Amino acid sequence: TAEKAEYCDDGFEERIINEEYKMWKKNTPFLYDIVMTHALEWPSLTAQWLPDVVRQENKDLETHSLILGTHTSDEQNHLLIATVNIPVMDQNFDLDKYEAEKNEAGAF
């Protein structure tokens, strides 16, 4: 039936998206200096970094702020102000901190 074919197509498309995500996640160490992920309740089509940055005393962290916009189907949309603690990236890369098994440099 047409409903069954549509269900199969949705499942197939979802598997393709999951495989592409896994491939991207595996290659992130080669593409980016740092990757931090967080699942949101609703997808955000809007993200804007704010200019204020606060350096954490006695820590190698900076707190950055950003605005996220919700994208819901049946509820009112909102703007959210979020904060993210990001490690201060040293200009000199220390190979002693690189963990080959995890493909990571340092830990936070």
Image (cartoon, rainbow, N blue to C red):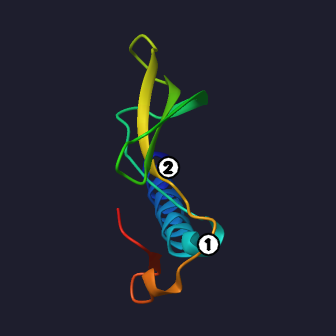
Task: In this rendered view, identify the residue nearer to me: 74 or 83.
Answer: 83
Give the residue drawn at x 51%, y 54%: 88
Against 52, is 5 above or below? below
Position of 10 compared to 92: left or right?
left
Position of 79 compared to 108: left or right?
right
Give the SS element for disc 2. Answer: helix
Give the residue drawn at x 50%, y 59%: 35
The quarter holding residue 106 reads bottom left
Q: Which residue lies under the disc numbered 2?
A: 6
Give the SS element for disc 1. Answer: loop
Q: Amino acid at mark 1?
A: Asn
Against 59, is 84 above or below? above
Residue furthest to the front = 58
Give the residue drawn at x 51%, y 75%: 26
Q: What x and y, as percent, mark residue 37?
A: 43, 52
Q: Which residue lies under the disc numbered 1?
A: 92
Task: In this rendered view, identify the residue nearer to me: 78 or 36.
Answer: 36
- Which one is earlier in the sequence, the residue at label 2 or at label 1? 2
Q: What x and y, as percent, mark residue 101?
A: 39, 89
Q: Quadrant of the C terminus?
A: bottom left
- Crowding around mark 2 (Cα neighbors within 10 Å: few <14, some 14 to 19, many 20+) is few
- Crowding around mark 1 (Cα neighbors within 10 Å: few <14, some 14 to 19, many 20+) is few
Whether residue 82 appears in this view of the structure is yes
Q: Amino acid at mark 2?
A: Glu
